[in-house]
Amino acid sequence: MSADPAEHFPADYRSGRHEFIAACGQSGIDVIARVHPQAKGRDGKPLFLDTAIIGPRDARKALLLISATHGVEGYFGSGVQTGLMREGLARHAPKDRKIVLLHALNPYGFSWDRRVNEDNADINRNFVDFAHPPQNEPYEMLAAEISPRDISPDAMKKANAKLTEFLKQRGAFALQEAISRGQYKFPDGVYYGGSRESWSARMLKDVVGENLAHVERLIVIDFHTGLGKLGAGEMITEDLPASPAYERARAMWGNLVASSEAGESVSAPLSGTIDKAFPGWLPGTELTFAALEVGTRSTRDVFNALRRDNWLHCFAEARHRHADAQVIRLELRDAFYPDTPEWKHMVWKHAGEVVGAALRAL
């Protein structure tokens, strides 16, 4: 057992997967691997979504823990999942409850240090009717400035001036929502929800159908990074205050709970999220879903890192050989994963508390 929680966090996707599987094996828990049929990792090797199940197959109450929905954010979720297994989750779990750990929902993004998948799609905007996807007119107005084709200082200054003008007219929250809600018209833009159901979305549906279709009560925690003050934590729900699901979340997690739909959260309202998909898959289940969001860098630094990463992969020539490719990759990694012991200790504490509260609630 590690004395230092910081040691649970991986150096990259491949080591994170190895350590997760090893920790499960040490607890006598098998891991089911789903291999990506096309995409390969940055090391040229296959990519996997791995699932570990603790507890009886027919349990009526369950906890689902998801990591790497947003690829590069998987350093946090993977570290938490591995650490929980190393520190006895399987031994201490209630005997009549099920715990499902889904490791690396978006293994491509995790391996390549990108937030998106192999199609430049945001998995947490990917659960929509693609024949009639949601509209985002403010993004359309600002698409060229949000995801610029030219990132030279002069071009960025002009782009930022137009975004600032929008902010002054409509407010900071409206700008955040325009950028991050999700858009379905610009495949080479940020927060693109995709044009089809992703492999990750299909695999998540498969995991839910195989392991959770019969449960009467389900709690889901999806691990995320990138919003909020450094090391701070928030449990983001899309349920409205006073709704039964919101009240269940508050009873579990107290003041950490914040509704994005009600304007309480560091997140704006979003389209096509995993949260919105679950009720359709499990119509008879009492569902409490929240994303544990932990803060990393300033909003400006995170946004600029996303834009530069998007430019590199969508607009730059010979992107993997580009002179700035490594710098941009590491900037993006740092924006979502501050690789310091201090940050790891803070976010590990949040994760332990919210998972512990969820287990007690079950």
Image (cartoon, grey):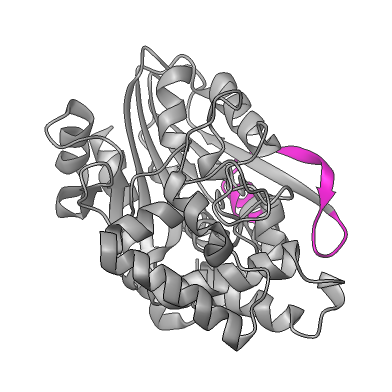
Give the position of the C terminus as an image quadrant. top left
Q: Position of residue 38 (x, y in %)?
A: 85, 43
Residue projecting furthest to the left: 242
Question: Which residue is nearer to you in this view: 44 or 175?
Answer: 175
Image: 276 above or below 267:
above
On the question of residue 6 being in view, the answer is no
Where are the magenta residues, as a range?
22-45
Q: Would you identify the image quadrant in which residue 102 lies?
A: top right
On the question of residue 83 being in view, the answer is yes
Question: Which residue is nearer to you in this view: 8 or 178?
Answer: 178
Question: Which residue is nearer to you in this view: 228 or 84?
Answer: 228
Residue at 61%, 44% (x, y): give it: 105
Q: Where is residue 85 in the image (x, y as percent from the top left)?
A: 51, 52
Residue at 60%, 54% (x, y): give it: 23
Judged left or right of residue 173, residue 116 is: right
Q: Is residue 106 magenta?
A: no
Q: Position of residue 111 (x, y in %)?
A: 71, 61
Question: Which residue is nearer to you in this view: 275 or 282?
Answer: 275
Q: Does the magenta stretch include residue 33?
A: yes
Residue at 65%, 64% (x, y): give it: 310
Image: 45 above or below 31:
below
Judged left or right of residue 44, residue 215 is: left
Q: Would you identify the image quadrant in which residue 98 lies?
A: top left
